[in-house]
Each structure stands twice: as C-alpha cells, then as structure tokens.
Amino acid sequence: MLDNYQSLEYARELLKPWVLSESTPAPERLDVELSAENLVAAVTALHQAGWGYLSAITGIDRPSSDPEQEGRIEVMYHFCWGGVVTTLRVFVPYSNPVIGTVCIEIPSASLYEREMIELYGVQFPGTPSTDHLLLPDDWPADVFPMRKSFTGFDSPDAD
Amino acid sequence: MNNILPIVALIIFPGGLFLLTSGLAYEWVDRKLIARFQNRFGPRWFQPLADTVKLLAKEEIIPQGVNAFLFILLPVMGLAAALTAALYVPMAGLAPSFSFRGDLVVTLYLLSVLTLCLGLAGANSADRFSLIGATRTLTQVFSYEAPFMLAMLGPAIVTGSWQINEVNAYAQSNLWLIIAQPIGFLVALVGLMGKLELPPFDAPEAETEIVSGALTEYSGRGYALFRLGKNVELVIGLTLVAAFYLGGLASPLDFLWKTLALLLVLALLQTLFARLRIDQTVGLWWRIGALLALVQLLVLIVL
Amino acid sequence: MMKIGAMFSEVFRSLFNKPTTHTYPVEKIPAPDHYRGKLVYNPETCTGCMLCVKDCPAEALELITIDRKAKKFVMRYHTDRCIFCSQCVENCRFSCLQMSNDQWELAALNKEPFTIYYGKEEDVRFILEPAAAEEAEQPCPESA
Amino acid sequence: MDKQEKFIVPIGPQHPALKEPGHFEFTVDGEVVTSATARLGYVHRGIEKAVENRNWTQAMYMLERICGICSHVHATAYCLGVEKLAGVEAPPRAQAIRVLIAELERIHSHMLWWGVAAHEGGFDILFMYTWRDRETVMELLEMISGNRVHYSANLIGGVKFDIDQKQADAIRKGIDYLEERTRHYLEIITTDETFLGRTRNIGVMTSDQAKSLGAVGPTARASDVHRDVRIDHPYAGYDRFPVQIVTEKEGDLEARFIVRLKELFESYRLIREVLDNLPDSELTVKVPRKIPAGQVISRVEAPRGELFYYIESNGSDQPERIKVRTPTLPNWGTVLSTAVGLKLADMPMLLVGIDPCFSCNDRLVYVKDQNQSLTEKTWSWDDLRNHGIERYK
C-alpha cells in the first residue's frame, strides 16, 4: 500500500491527460477539474488502476448572478483510497446538463447517478435505470428539488 | 340416558369446553414459561382468553379469489378433528369416553387433520405468503409424521395393543417407558413440536420471511379457531406422550403434573434453538428422527 | 466445536431470576442528573439577548420582550416542538435556562399543556390577558 | 404467479422482517431465490435541502437526526468538517470525549444489530438477552449525555459535557459487564449448532467482490478488506487513541457476526484507555457564527462503515451545500448480488447482515437479476400498486 503522498501522486499521474486545473485543499486531498466529455475516461483510468473506490457523487447548483450568463451544475466524483480522497469536478450548463455514465465501469454508481438525475436534472445517457429513486412516483418531471431555484411548492392550505 | 352421555362427552368433557379452557390455560403456561426463560414477565393469565375473544369478535375478511366455502370450513374442521381426537385419549387422567381396538391410529390421524386443514387453508388463500407457508406446512407434515407415528407405536408394540386405554394401563403398571425407550420419547416429544409448528420447527409460519405462513390471510373467527385447534392439540399431544412414556395417567393430579412437566421441557426446547430452514427440518427428520425411531422399533421387535 | 443449545444453563437460570423488565408506571426509575427533560426558564437573569431563540433548531422558543430596560420578558416554550437538544442551555451566557431531570412525563391528551409560559407572574398575566380578551371579543366561527 | 412460472415474494414496505420501511422482491423457484430487487426511499425526508436553510448550529441537529442509531457519528462528521472550515480545532479533551461516545454508540449499535439479526434467524433467545444487556450501554449514554438516543454531545468547536470521576467509574463497571457478556455471546454464535446452520457459509462475499462493489465497514471487513477510516485517516481523538483493525476471511454471515463482536472488544479497550488518559483542557473553542467560504470532505467510521460528508460554505451563517453519503448505500449492492441462489429463509438474515439503516440511506436500489437484464416479468412497485388497486376496487 502506498502512503498518502504517493497515492495522490499516482492519481495525479493517472489523471494528467485531462486535467484543466488542480488543487490540494487539504494534505490528504486532490481536487481536479475536468471537462465533462473527459470524465468517463478519467474515471475509467482511476478505476482500472485500482485507485480506491467511488465513494460518492456530489452535485451543487451554481446559479449565475449575471442574467446574461447561464447557471451551471457542478458534479463531483469522490474517490476514496485509504486516507486520501481524489475529487473529479465537472461543470455542465443548465441548457445541456449531460455527462457520460460511469455505470459501465462501476455498476454501483447507478444509485448515485440516479440521485443526480432526480435532484439536479443532470442527464447520464446510457445509465441503466432512470426510475425514481428518492422522490415520489408522482413528482413532476421538470422540478429538480436540489437546485437553488426550488423553494418548495405552494402549500395546499394556501388557497 | 344413552344419548346424553356422548353429548356431554362431546360438549363438556373431555371434548368441548374442558378442552378449550385447558387449551387456553396451557397456551398461557407455555407463553409464560418462554417469557421467564427469556427473562421477561410474560402475559397475564387471561391473555389467551382475551386474544380469542377479541379475534372472535372481529370481522372476518374473506379475500377474493379464494373458495369461500373452504375458507370458512377448514378452521372448523381442524378444530373439530382436534376435539374429536380427545375422545379416545385419557384426558385429565380419566378413562377415555370412547375406546375401541385401534383407536391409537384413529387419534393420530385425527391429530394430523388440523395440520392438513392448515395446509389446505394456506393453499386455498391466493396469497404468496400463504402458498409458501402451505408448501412448508405440508412438507413438514411428511417429514415428522412418520417418525412421530413410529415413536407412538413403540409403547403400543410392547403393550401388544393398539388401544390407547390399554397402553395407558400398561404404562401404569410397568417401568416408565421413558427409561425403557428413551429414543422413542425424544422423537415423540420433538415430533409434537413439529406438529404444533413450535420453534425451532416454525419455518411454516416464520414471521420474518412469510409473515405468518398459511394463516396470513386469516383474521377474526377463522384465525381464532385455528389457534384454538392448536392449543387443543397441544393438550392432547402432551396427554398422549405423558400417558405413553411417563408412566401413564391414573388420576387428574397425575395428568396435571406430568403434562406440565412435559410443557416445561417443551418450552425450554422452544427457546433454545434458532429456527431451522425447511430443508434442514426435513433433513433432520429423515436422516436422524426416522432412523432413530426405526432402530428403536427394531430393537423392540427383536427383543 | 459445535454445541446444541449453547445457551441452556443461562436460560434455565432465568426461570428462577426476577425478570429484568421494568413495570414502568408502577415502578419509576429516577432519571440521571444530566437528563435533558423539560426546559426551565428563570426570568431573573435574562437579558433578552435572543441567542437561545436564534439557534433553536426546532423553533420551540419564543421570547416576548415587554420592556427590555425593566427586564420584563416572557418565554413561550412549545414542548411539542422541542427536541431536547439543550443548545439553548449552551447558548445562554447568564444560565437562565436549565433542563429539568425530573419533569419528563410530558404526554397529554390535548395540545394545550404543550405551550408553557415562563416569566414573572405579572408579565405572564400581561401577555395572556389581551390574548384571552381578544379571543373572547371575536369568536372565530371558522375555527370550529 | 404468472404464466412465466415466476413466483415473487415481496418483503416490505411493511413486513415483520423489516424494522423500517423498505421494499424487496425475491423471485423464488421453490425455496431458492433466483433474483432480487429492492426499492427504498420510503423515509426520504429531504434533509440535504433542508439544512441549506438553517444556520450552522441548527444544521447540526438536523443532520444528527438522519439516524436514530448512529446520531453521534453524523454530528461528529459534520462538526469536524465545519471546524476545519473555520480553521479551529476542538480541544483534546473534547476530541477524546467524542471518541468515547462514538465507541459507546458503536457498542449499542452492534448489540442492536446482532439482536435483530438473531431474531431474523428465529433465535429469539439471543435477541432478548442481547437487548437486555444493551440496556446497560443505553443507560450509560443516558447518564453521560442526558438522552438515550440523540446524545447531542457535539457542539461546533467541542462537546457539551464533561466526564467526571463518578461517571467514569460507572462506565468502567458497565464495560466490564458488557465485555464478559460479549465474550459469552461470541462463544454462542460460534458454537450453537442451530444458529451456525443459519449463518455459516451463507451469503459468502469474496474479498474481490467486496472491493469491487465498494463495500464499507464491518461488511467489508468480514470479507478481509481492510477498510476502516479510524485507521486509514484518524479523525477526532483516534490519532491519540489508535484502533486495531478487526477482519475475518470467510465473508459469510458468521464472519459478519464475528467481526462485529470482536470489534466490540476493541471498543471496550479504547473506552478504558480514553477514561484512563482523558487529556486536561477546555471543552470548547470559540467558532464564529459565519463560517469562512470553502469546501471540506469529512469522513468518519460509523458503526456501519464509512460515513462521507462533503460540506461547502459560502461565507455566510448558512451552509451552501452538505452532501451526506451513508454507509448503508454502498453496502446494498453486496446483499442483492449475494442473494441469488440462496434459500428464501436466508433472505431476512442476509438483508440485515449489512446492518441496513433505511432512514440513513433513504434511497432506492434496483438490481439486475441473474441474467443481467431487468426482466419485464418482475413486478415493479407501480404494477404492484395498480394490481392492488384493481384487485380491491
């Protein structure tokens, strides 16, 4: 087993071809930004090298304060290996929120991807299932509760 | 006068009322003992009665897709068969109301009717849990029935009679058969547990898998009758085993302490084990139970 | 090594031991000293800083200021909302909030006992009276 | 039962085997399970969204209530993360108390689990006795913290209460009793024949399977995968009080029992060590109401496995985003992929074998069946519901 520094170096090396920018927010972390189309390749590289396991996929809504500019959704793939965490970040715009699915490489990612589909409206073409995961079956299709613009439905008692 | 006695026997003693009350009482003792084994308080004395009254008062829901006639008939038949079986058994240590040569076989069959009714009731209700429960119940019947019968035949063979009354009399005047035929006693006792679907042989109604097995769709009266049937069978089964293996039943006092002692052992056995899977149950009975009973029988015949 | 009935001796002993179950309403076990039961408010030291109200995760506290200078405060405490986390006790720098360790049987059959008013007697009366009067003046038909 | 000769046994959403709502469907052939699917999400409460409208302190109590069994680890993960963002560190005594409570919580969680698991196998006597003994640790926790379930020990920047000598003695006494009992139970689960018949070689998961499915916690450790955040990345007081990893090689249900029981001995040792060496310091440090902008990942070892928190602040007094990934989620895959080929009777034990916490994971899973395709013949929840509506119209 590699120590923390070595494993981060290893990840850095594996991800080199696709990195847009990188940072180390904490000594045991590597944070890498990628473009959406390179994500699958990067995940595949990490997974096939046996670099840890996909621990979580986090989404964050980044609405734009400038009306001219479109808001984006940030999606993070966290890989844990022993004490270290590598995070792959991609940004997708509201108008085209599409990321390739990683379920082919990591079948258990299906759950995380479905959560993203439902809560943020990100699309993963090719993901095995898009059934409702968390929300009720009769949840409206175009409402994504984790986006900042969602502040709840009108209460039925209001009228 | 000739007509009244059988009716009394059927309705009050030893059938009917007496059996129902003693069934409830024995259920309470069983539950209380298990609770104490588990370091709990357990129910109060009227709990089984309260359960029964409540169930009887409840609406009986007949699910769609079942044969309603059978659905209602089966619990009644089961209970009736169990009550009838009591007529040939020395209940409360008194002589059986009816007795004829070969009544042992009849009693054993009557005791199986309840289980069969249970299986049929499960198969009749179109519920998945019931169906699985029914399959398991019937599978289990085929596994414990043969060893149980063999175990009951042991005393009959040494007596040289198939009449329960005579076996009882023989047991009273001879060495307790539990010492002479320990294997038979063990198989009979454990067979009784299988018959009553008590843990660890409760796979047919394993609550964590199939809710309550064959009886899942039963509520209200039907369920109450099945429960009563089982309680009655518990009493009869205990009486039979006590009469055969524990030196016979000569008086009500004899009956009381011998059956209660058996119940204590039964309750202890219930608490001690994890539930057997149905394949383990079948394996256990055919590989060990039947074999042991056969060996015992062979030894008896040869001697 | 395999055993059949590995728990036998223990189980058998239980038959002669007292059951461990507590028969609760009959036999009551005193709560530990640090038990977090009903919140108790002491108006004497309160400065009306509102820190308790601000951090309450369940919106169980309302502090009504009658007169800040005269230190006239009334606390309306909703036991049914309270999650008994004691964050308010931590926040209070003047120790006027405490969680009681003997008042924890808070169940009731209606909603009324769940709203508790704390404060000096005359202040509570001052808060309660106008509300009562208001209610009496306009009986709300819709609320029926 | 349809024309395809498929016989599906539904377990849940309400079922005696499940102590929380979840829905599983097992297609059986006789008694043998041929495929397994699950739908969860019956207890989804939208906590991740809700915390975005609360201040940092209130969010902690919200997150603590994700789970009723492992409430302390949620709050610990959150507090450690927020403290890191704020650039402060809780004093050593506070960190030690966090470890102490986390280990006490692990004891109560594991005891709860093995009681439930024994009950699923119809071994009610073990269930009753473990839950009786579990009261000891519940009472200890109540004595220290003032509540049996939500201890609320954490504050951002420290802990709420101290451990005094009297309490320490009571804990030592309780731990001694529990250690003896645990040793006794370990003997029972490894020797009782009927129970071993239900656990040995059931639901075997190999080490490679566990690694690739991303199993965490005791489930992974029972398959000889060395994953424990307390060791890999010591947090709170775990650098001062190191833990030894406990693993088993078999990967079956028995191994999962053994790992959890042996882990308790480690917990007992650790608790004694913490009590003997409680560092002297303050209990809290001051943390500003507004947390500086930034993002942090906080991982802790919950009783069920790795708990993952991603916390982001925008510099205000409310969090920007808190992502929680609970340990039950990655463990689901392990259950449903080992279910195929087993007996129906083993399902409840297998399901609880990973110590699932539905309110923790409040998510839905769909698993492919043996031939790797979602069969049309398997009833979906919708079909079932419509069927129910049609049937009982």
Image: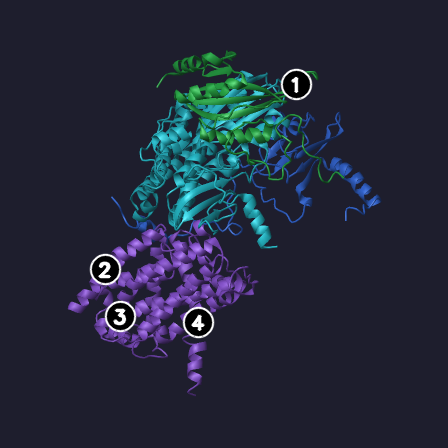
Q: Could you classify mark 3 by the number of other residues whose Cα lies within 10 Å: few (under 14), some (14-19), or many (20 or more)?
A: many
Q: Colour of chain B?
A: purple
Quickly name the residue at label 3: B247
Which residue of the protein is positioned furthest toward the right in this rendering? C137
Which residue of the protein is positioned furthest toward the bottom in this rendering? B1
Sequence-wise first label, 4 or 2: 4
Give the residue type at disc 4: Ala
Separation (CA) of disc 1 from disc 3: 93 Å
The x and y percentages for residue A154 are: 71, 35
Question: Mark 1 or 3, which is nearer the eye?
Answer: 1
Separation (CA) of disc 1 from disc 4: 79 Å
The answer as to whether the residues below labels 1 and 3 share one chain is: no
Separation (CA) of disc 2 from disc 1: 82 Å
Chain letter for the residue marked with disc 1 in the picture: A
Decide which of C19, B262 is in the foreground and name it: B262
Residue drawn at x 52%, y 47% as measured from the top left = D14
SS under mark 1: loop
Give the residue type at disc 3: Gly
Q: Is residue C82 left or right of residue B231?
A: right
Sequence-wise first label, 2 or 3: 3
Give the residue type at disc 1: Glu
Quickly name the residue at label 1: A70
- Where on the picture, by quarter, is residue C46? top right
Count of numbered tags: 4
Identify the chain drawn in green.
Answer: A
